[in-house]
Image (cartoon, helix red, strand yellow):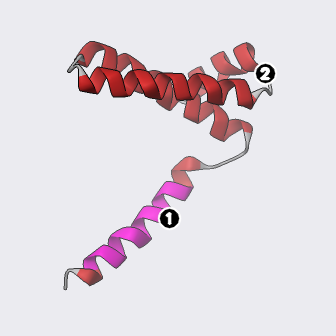
Amino acid sequence: MSASLPIKYYSRKYGDNTSAAFIHLVREIGQVAFAIETKNDPVLEAKLTEAIALLQFIAHSHKVDVESNTEMMYSKKLLLSERKHE
């Protein structure tokens, strides 16, 4: 998925109001939970997509490089995990 599409969309919708975007995200997470609980896969797919898109927008708005941070953070976590299992 191109991160630029949700960023562009939510920039139009929320501007710099990431608080409103976060409130929207929390609502979507609640709907993700309900979709998992009720085993509603089409809704789960839609709501997970929406939640991820909102996270991309919020991260972009706060200049967080999620891809780089994820690579750095989880390579360390995996290394530590491997050492525990040796």
Magenta residue check for 71: yes
- Mark sitting on residue 15: 2
What residue appears at the point 38 percent right and 17 percent down from the top-left corner? 46
What residue appears at the point 73 percent right and 30 percent down from the top-left corner? 19
- SS at mark 2 in the image: loop
| Camera-side residue of 79 and 14 | 14
Does residue 5 appear left or right of residue 31 in this picture? right
> Residue 71 in the image: x percent, y percent?
47, 59
Return the disc, 2 or 1, that comes first in the chain's sequence: 2
Q: Is residue 25 visible?
A: yes
Instruction: Check disc 1 and give the amino acid type.
Output: Met
| Camera-side residue of 38 and 11 | 38
- Few, some or many residues within 10 Å of mark 2 (<14, 14–19, 20+): few
| Camera-side residue of 77 and 23 | 23
Instruction: Check disc 2 and give the amino acid type.
Output: Gly
Q: Is residue 84 above or below residue 19?
A: below
Magenta residue check for 17: no
- SS at mark 1 in the image: helix
Does residue 56 appear left or right of residue 32 in this picture? right
Report the label total: 2
> Residue 22 in the image: x percent, y percent?
64, 30
What residue appears at the point 20 percent right and 21 percent down from the top-left corner? 39
> Residue 6 in the image: x percent, y percent?
58, 22
Q: Residue furthest right?
A: 16
Quarter of the rendering occupied by the N terminus: top left
> Residue 86 in the image: x percent, y percent?
19, 86
- Mark sitting on residue 72: 1
What residue appears at the point 71 percent right and 24 percent down from the top-left corner? 20
- Mark sitting on residue 56: none
Could you say which quadrant of the image residue 62 lies in? Answer: top right
Cβ atoms at labels 2 and 1 below 8 Å apart: no
Magenta part of the protein: which range? Answer: 69-82
